[in-house]
Image (cartoon, helix red, strand yellow):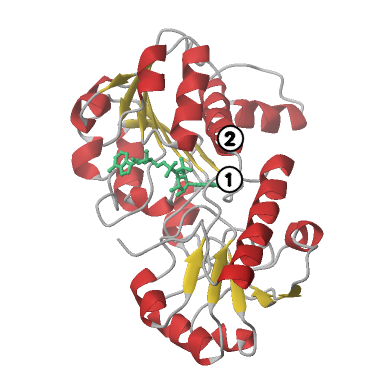
């Protein structure tokens, strides 16, 4: 099959190869204005910040596209109803390395707690003082994990390893985690009891702005909030307000609700227009990474292998085991 790969980065060229398919590596993100680039291709391969809304899908379908192969797990950026209506099969990579994202979440937490980002900056300036860098022992603290699928489960195990009490909230409790001592609880109790809250649920209409003024008010003052899932789980202006009041003690994010067009790009020569994002960068207790949670060698190899297998299966059968259906 001929596949148009949108939002191409160097690692895509390096890993997405092999098999009998012909890949055209395109740097633009997919949206309704760029979908035409895929005309004449049987499939489009998309990443997290491509926008496969109804207009983009209509254009892809008009151009002969029959497959959207997501090289990611989340699929909130694809209008699945529109794809179904236009006869396009959507498949994804449901699992590639839950450890990559869970370990990154733990990294954000550790860096924020022990202020490693600030210590690094100080030492580069010849300032070896430790004033203001005091953290706390994670051992004995309570970690609240929202969503205990693949990544949330790996994060629970890491927190248990640190000696934390782990509370979890998920409509589908995982008995293996319960056996390890993870306690499932309704969200309000998790929020009011946790020193650290880490988000690992998908973005759906039901979880959008799960963290907003009302839910922040339920949290322990000074809570450490980590989000490696999807930016829109947090209402960012409410989080900024809570940071200014000290209600949120630290915020670690790998995702941001308006990240499209910013994350993954080098904008160091431009004026960034997003005042909310720029305000976030001014807090000493906010650590932002640019959607790199997935970015380990193992994960990228697995993403490429599953994407190729998905395309192979679709080319052979017209369907795919990792197909995503509308809810
Ligand atoms: P998963 O599908 O294995 O687990 C998601 C879990 O969330 C499920 O157990 C589900 O029951 C639970 N859930 C659904 N609604 C919920 C709610 N309202 N409250 C609490 N739990 C709820 O997904 P996986 O692989 O663990 O990924 C989680 C999320 O991480 C993805 O949806 C994606 O947005 C994000 N992600 C981020 C990456 C990054 O690079 N930062 C990379 C990969 C995924």
Image quadrant occupied by the N terminus: bottom right
Pointer 2 residue Cβ closer than 8 Å to ligand 1:
yes
Q: Nearer the viewer, residue 72 or 2?
A: 2
Image spot of residue 89 (x, y percent): 48, 71
Quadrant housing residue 308? bottom right
Name the N-terminal-most of marks 1 and 2: 2
Quadrant housing residue 41? bottom right
The residue sitting at 22% across, 38% down in the picture is 215
Residue neighbourhood size for the residue with mark 2, other residues' Cα within 10 Å, grouped as few (<14), some (14–19), many (≥20): many
48 up-or-down from 130: above or below: below
Q: Is residue 310 left or right of residue 305?
A: left
Q: Is residue 232 left or right of residue 192?
A: right
Image spot of residue 9 (x, y percent): 72, 63
Residue, disc 2:
104
The residue sitting at 64% across, 90% down in the picture is 40
88 up-or-down from 279: above or below: below
Which image quarter has ligand 1? top left
Q: Nearer the viewer, residue 325 or 155?
A: 325
Residue furthest out toward the front: 317
Q: Nearer the viewer, residue 168 or 317?
A: 317
The CA span between labels 1 and 2 is 10 Å
The residue sitting at 50% across, 59% down in the picture is 259
166 up-or-down from 84: above or below: above
Quadrant housing residue 4? bottom right
The residue sitting at 51% across, 23% down in the picture is 113
Name the secondary structure under disc 2. Answer: helix
Q: Is residue 160 left or right of residue 208?
A: right
Residue 181, visible in the rendered structure: no
Residue, disc 1:
289
């Amino acid at each position: 099959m001929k596949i148009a790969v949108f939002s191409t980065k160097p690692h895509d060229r390096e890993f997405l190869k092999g098999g009998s398919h012909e890949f055209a590596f395109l740097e633009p993100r997919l949206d309704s204005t760029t979908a035409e680039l895929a005309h004449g291709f049987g499939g489009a391969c998309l990443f997290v910040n491509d926008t496969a809304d109804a207009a983009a899908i209509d254009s892809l379908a008009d151009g002969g596209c029959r497959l959207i192969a997501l090289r990611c797990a989340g699929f909130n950026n694809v209008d699945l109803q529109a794809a179904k209506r236009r006869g396009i099969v959507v498949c994804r990579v449901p699992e590639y390395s839950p450890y990559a994202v869970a370990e990154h979440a733990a990294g954000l937490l550790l860096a924020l707690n022990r202020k490693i980002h600030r210590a690094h900056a100080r030492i580069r300036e010849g300032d070896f003082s430790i004033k203001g860098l005091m953290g706390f022992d994670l051992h004995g603290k309570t970690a609240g994990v929202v969503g205990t699928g693949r990544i949330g489960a790996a994060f629970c195990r890491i927190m248990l390893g640190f000696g934390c009490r782990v509370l979890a909230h998920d409509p589908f409790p995982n008995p293996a985690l319960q056996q390890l001592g993870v306690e499932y609880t309704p969200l309000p109790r998790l929020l009011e009891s946790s020193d650290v809250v880490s988000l690992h649920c998908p973005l759906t209409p039901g979880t959008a702005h799960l963290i907003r003024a009302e839910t922040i008010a339920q949290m322990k003052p000074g809570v450490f909030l980590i989000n490696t899932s999807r930016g829109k789980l947090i209402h960012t202006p409410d989080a900024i307000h809570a940071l200014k009041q000290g209600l949120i003690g630290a915020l670690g994010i790998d995702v941001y609700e308006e990240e499209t067009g910013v994350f993954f790009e080098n904008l160091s020569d431009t004026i960034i227009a997003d005042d909310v994002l720029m305000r976030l960068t001014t807090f000493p207790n906010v650590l932002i990474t640019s959607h790199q949670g997935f970015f380990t060698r193992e994960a990228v190899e697995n993403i490429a292998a599953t994407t190729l297998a998905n395309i192979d299966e679709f080319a052979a059968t017209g369907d795919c085991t990792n197909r995503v259906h509308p809810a």
